[in-house]
Amino acid sequence: MADAPPTKPKAAAAVPPKPVQIGGESFVDRILPHIKKIAWACVGVAIVVTVFFGYRAFKQRGERKSTAALADVIALAEQPLREPGTPADVKHPSFADAKERATAVLAAISKNDVKVTPQFNGAFLVDVGRFDDAIAGYRTCDAPAIEGLDGVLCREGLGLALEAKAAANPDTTVRQKGYEEALAAFKVMQPDEAGPRAAYAKYHEGRMLELLNKRDDAKTAFEKAKDLGKDANDLTDLIEARLATLGA
């Protein structure tokens, strides 16, 4: 009996391969449990970025608006005054007098909440007769320790406001006291004779002394102002006129 041919072993049943991601879970698998947290984090970052750039844009828009409002105020302040009896001209804006101009400027400052210096604001407050408001503003920057032109102008403004308030008072005693206060302000206006507006400080002193009927002292102050303001032609003419009235 012939040997039976060897039987071939049955082939092993094919086993479907198990789907294994080499290296462990995929990035997507790892991130899925945290996707909500990440989404909220992205939203948070977006909000921060939006707020930052929105604030910056708002601030820049506000700065542009403030600058434009300030420019409008300055434009009003620079409009000229018409000659008495001259009609208004729409093509060439102007004001009938200083009080009308000051009223318009102050209204524009208040309406647009424009930030201006006490020196700028005070001059217009004086023009509308709001002397106490002007004086209060000037006193915020009139300390002799404040150096430079800003401090000088503030102290000068204070003296002028005190003088204007005194001049408007019908009571002689009160008026004289006001002139003395103005004189005191002008005396500390510019302590440095070589500093800016030193000649004007002496000129103001002379005016107050003249109003207080201290003629000799007034002459001395005017002469000093003339010496300090040799190069200021406008001031020299004013001083010469004052000295002439005093008989100098």
Image (spheres, rainbow, N blue to C red):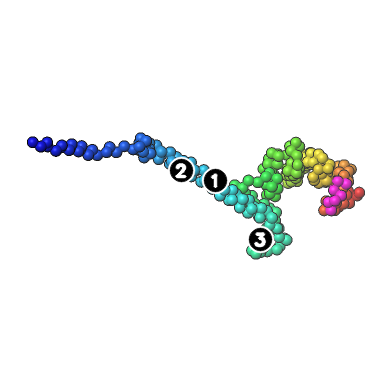
Residue 95: percent from left, percent from top: 68, 58
Q: Are the residues at dot 1 and dot 3 in contact (C-beta closer than 8 Å)? A: no
Q: Give, as a three-letter code, the residue at label 2.
A: Ala
Whether residue 112 is visible to the viewer of this picture, yes or no, is no
Q: Which residue is mark 2?
A: 46
In three-dimensional space, the C-alpha distance between marks 2 and 3, rounded to whole angstroms, equals 50 Å
Q: Which residue is mark 3?
A: 93
Where disc 1 sits, the SS reads helix
Q: Which residues are magenta?
A: 227-233
> Within 10 angstroms of label 2, few (less than 14), some, or many (20 or more) residues?
few
Viewer-nearest of labels 2 and 1?
2
Residue at image point 17% right, 38% down: 8
Where disc 2 sits, the SS reads helix
Viewer-nearest of labels 1 and 3?
1
Give the camera-side residue of 63 and 31: 31
Mark identifier at residue 134: none
Q: Quadrant of residue 218?
A: top right
> Is 48 placed left or right of 149 in the picture?
left
Q: Quadrant of residue 16?
A: top left
If you read the primary sequence from the N terminus, does the residue marked by circle 1 or circle 3 appear first? 1
In the displayed structure, 146 sits above or below 84; it is above
Q: Which residue is mark 1?
A: 56
Q: Give, as a three-letter code, the residue at label 1.
A: Arg
Residue at image point 70% right, 63% down: 86
In three-dimensional space, the C-alpha distance between marks 2 and 1, rounded to whole angstroms, equals 15 Å
> Within 10 angstroms of label 1, few (less than 14), some, or many (20 or more) residues?
few
* Residue 47 shown in magenta: no
Q: Give, as a three-letter code, the residue at label 3.
A: Pro
Where disc 3 sits, the SS reads loop
Whether residue 115 is visible to the viewer of this picture, yes or no, is yes
